Image (cartoon, rainbow, N blue to C red):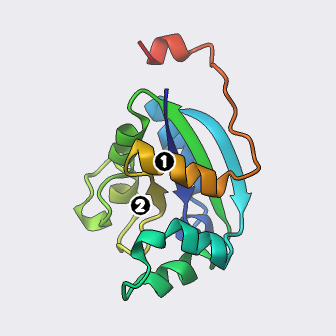
C-alpha cells in the first residue's frame, strides 16, 4: 500500500472544514493510518517547506502554516498519492474541478485548504517530519477487500 501525507491547513481549520476534507479522502476509499492535531512551529515549517527556502514567498508559507493548528494525516491505498491529489483538485482553487475539495470549497491559491504529498518519495519525507516519534498504524479494514484488488 502506498502512503501519502495530508495536511488540513489553517484556513480549513478556521473554517470548520477539517472533517469535510478528511471525510472526502476516506469516502474515496483511502484508509486512515495516522492522525495528529498539532501546532506547527517555525522549525517544522522550515523543514517542510525547505525546497522553497530563498524564494520570495517562503516567509509567507512559514507564517501561514504556523498561524493556527493543523491536522496531519497519513492515508494509504493503491495509488494513494495520485488519488488524494485528484480528490483535492488543482492547487489554484478556481482552476480545480467541481467535486474536488478545492474546487468546491476554495477560492484563493494561498488559502487552498489542504496539502497532499506530490510523490511517494515526498510522502515518506513529509510523514517523517509530521509523525516523528508518533506511530503510523498498520491495520486492515474489513471493507478493504471491497476497495482494493
Residue that label 1 marks: 123
Crowd around label 2: few <14 · some 14–19 · many ≥20 (10 Å): some
Kindly identify the residue that appears in the image at 63 percent across and 35 percent down. 33
Q: Position of residue 39 (x, y in %)?
A: 71, 69
Write down the quadrant of residue 45 in the picture.
bottom right
Q: Which mark is residue 41?
A: none
Above or below for 32 versus 12 = above
- Please identify, in this view, whether the residue under mark 1 or under mark 2 is nearer the observer: 1
Kindly identify the residue that appears in the image at 48 percent across and 59 percent down. 114
Q: Which is more toward the observer, 81 or 125?
A: 125
The quarter of the picture where the C terminus appears is: top left
- Asked if the residue at tag 2 contacts the one at tag 1, i.e. Cβ–Cβ closer than 8 Å, the answer is no
Q: Which is more toward the observer, 40 or 50?
A: 50
Q: Describe the element under mark 2 as helix, strand or loop.
A: helix
Please tell me which of labels 1 and 2 falls first in the chain.
Answer: 2
Identify the residue at the far right of this view: 133
Kindly identify the residue that appears in the image at 32 percent across and 57 percent down. 103
Q: Relative to residue 35, is residue 147 drawn left or right?
A: left
Above or below for 93 versus 3 = below
Crowd around label 1: few <14 · some 14–19 · many ≥20 (10 Å): many
Counting labels gives 2
Q: Describe the element under mark 1 as helix, strand or loop.
A: helix
Residue 30 seen in render:
no
Above or below for 135 versus 79 = below
Q: Position of residue 82 (x, y in %)?
A: 34, 40
Residue that label 2 marks: 105
Q: Which is more toward the observer, 4 or 143?
A: 4
Q: CA distance from mark 1 to mark 2?
A: 24 Å
Residue 91 seen in render:
yes
Amino acid at each position: 500500500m502506498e502512503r501519502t501525507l495530508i495536511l488540513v491547513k489553517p484556513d480549513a481549520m478556521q473554517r470548520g472544514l477539517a472533517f469535510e476534507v478528511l471525510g472526502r479522502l476516506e469516502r474515496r476509499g483511502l484508509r486512515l493510518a495516522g492522525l495528529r492535531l498539532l501546532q506547527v512551529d517555525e522549525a517544522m515549517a522550515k523543514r517542510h517547506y525547505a525546497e522553497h527556502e530563498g524564494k520570495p514567498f517562503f516567509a509567507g508559507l512559514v507564517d501561514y502554516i504556523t498561524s493556527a493548528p493543523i491536522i496531519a494525516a497519513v492515508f494509504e491505498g493503491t495509488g494513494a498519492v495520485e488519488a488524494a491529489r485528484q480528490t483535492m483538485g488543482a492547487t489554484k482553487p478556481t482552476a480545480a474541478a467541481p467535486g474536488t475539495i478545492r474546487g468546491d470549497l476554495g477560492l484563493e491559491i494561498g488559502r487552498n485548504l489542504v496539502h497532499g504529498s506530490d510523490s511517494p518519495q515526498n510522502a515518506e519525507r513529509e510523514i517523517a517530519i509530521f509523525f516523528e516519534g508518533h506511530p503510523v498504524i498498520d491495520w486492515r479494514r474489513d471493507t478493504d477487500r471491497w476497495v482494493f484488488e
